[in-house]
Image (tube, rainbow, N blue to C red):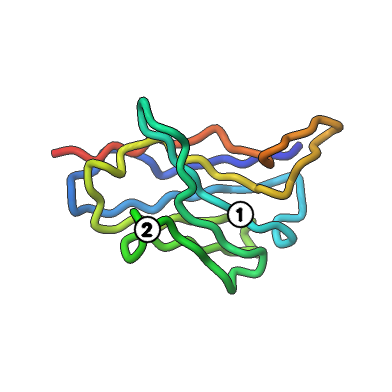
Amino acid sequence: QVQLVESGGGLVQPGGSLRLSCAASGFTFSSYAMRWYRQAPGKECELVADITNTGDGTNYADSVKGRFIISRDNAKNTVYLQMNSLIPEDTASYYCNAPHLLYVKGDYYPRGFWGQGTTVTVSS
């Protein structure tokens, strides 16, 4: 069964840090690039960061550059998002995505396969 399961969200004060994890199963994780997206209430979904399948290439949204770090451990089938210097504008649901995992058990996922999300709230 193909799954992406996010964890690590929660309530944090401004300036604090959180590390999100996304545990993958049911597919060859090391063959796929991975992405983190986020969606704040009333706002469009935003691509936060992505990482190549080997982990040797990363990209970040301007809004998180210098504060967030995406990484992966292919031995553990897990991708991470280290979030530092959090600000209230980082409050959102964060989703793990395998953008090139388009077919799962005959179902087509045009934007790739998604996890269920984890919520981050930055507030004092």
Residue shown at 24% from the left, 57% from the top? 85
Q: Give how far across and how far down residue 12 sits, in percent.
A: 24, 43
The quarter of the image holding the N terminus is top right
**Viewer-side residue, 32 vs 41:** 41
* Label 2 vs 1, first from the N-terminus: 1
Residue projecting furthest to the right: 106
Report which residue position mark 2 lands on: 62
Determine the secondary structure under disc 2.
loop
* Rendered image: mark on residue 34: 1
**Viewer-side residue, 116 vs 87:** 87
* Rendered image: mark on residue 67: none
Residue 89 left/right relative to 70? left
Q: Quadrant of residue 124?
A: top left
Residue shown at 49% from the left, 44% from the top? 37
Residue 88 left/right relative to 116? left
Q: How many C-alpha atoms fall within 10 Å of the one at disc 2: few (<14), some, or many (≥20)?
A: few
Residue 77 left/right relative to 117? right
- Badge nearest the viewer, 2 or 1: 2
Q: Amino acid at mark 2?
A: Asp
